[in-house]
Amino acid sequence: MAKGKPAKKSPKKTVKAKKPAARNAAEERALKEIEAEDKQLDAKLESVITEVTQPEKTRVEQTASVECPYCGEVFELHITVDEEGQTLSEDCPVCSRSMSIHLQMEEDELHVEAHRS
């Protein structure tokens, strides 16, 4: 810069932020009521979604007679069924051979089938 000449200043621009439109008390109450209704509806919808997506689980505990597919000996087995089409692996208490036991619930009746492993 040369001596004797003052530096040019750029003009300052001031930007004013727009204020949000003022709401009256009636509008505020109406908005709060709508928000409260939305929360209630969300809670109801959540409970419906949970009911539809999570089927009821039935847990069956009982004793069943099982015939060994190897030696033919019948023995009692305490069974707990948590899901449909469950398969267990058990050893015969008489001949000690391993077998697969398939459990199926049909119309509240337990069906048990033993097969060679």
Image (cartoon, rainbow, N blue to C red):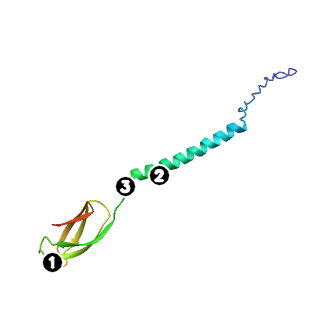
Q: Which element is circle 1 on?
A: loop
Residue type indicated by callout 1: Cys
Upstream in the sequence, badge 1 or badge 3?
3
* Residue 27 picture quarter: top right
**In terms of depth relative to the viewer, which is nearer, 93 or 66?**
66
Q: Position of residue 52 (x, y in %)?
A: 40, 50
Upstream in the sequence, badge 2 or badge 1?
2
Q: Which element is circle 2 on?
A: helix
Q: For label 2, count other residues whose C-alpha is less than 10 Å away and answer few (under 14), some (14-19) or many (20+).
A: few
Q: For label 3, count other residues whose C-alpha is less than 10 Å away and answer few (under 14), some (14-19) or many (20+).
A: few
Q: Residue at x 83, y 21 (%)?
A: 2
**In terms of depth relative to the viewer, which is nearer, 15 or 34?**
34
Q: Which residue is mark 3?
A: 55
Upstream in the sequence, badge 2 or badge 3?
2
Q: Position of residue 8 (x, y in %)?
A: 81, 21
* Residue 86 picture quarter: bottom left
Residue type indicated by callout 3: Pro
**In terms of depth relative to the viewer, which is nearer, 78 or 31?**
31
Q: For label 1, count other residues whose C-alpha is less than 10 Å away and answer few (under 14), some (14-19) or many (20+).
A: few
CB under 8 Å between discs 2 and 1: no
Q: Position of residue 90 (x, y in %)?
A: 22, 71
How far apart are the alpha carbons under marks 2 and 3? Answer: 13 Å
Q: Residue at x 64, y 40 (%)?
A: 31
Q: Left or right of 112: which side holds 49?
A: right
Residue 87 numbered mark, or none = none
Q: Which residue is mark 2?
A: 47
Q: Which residue is mark 1?
A: 95
CB under 8 Å between discs 2 and 3: no
Give the vertical position of 80 relative to 7 (above or below): below
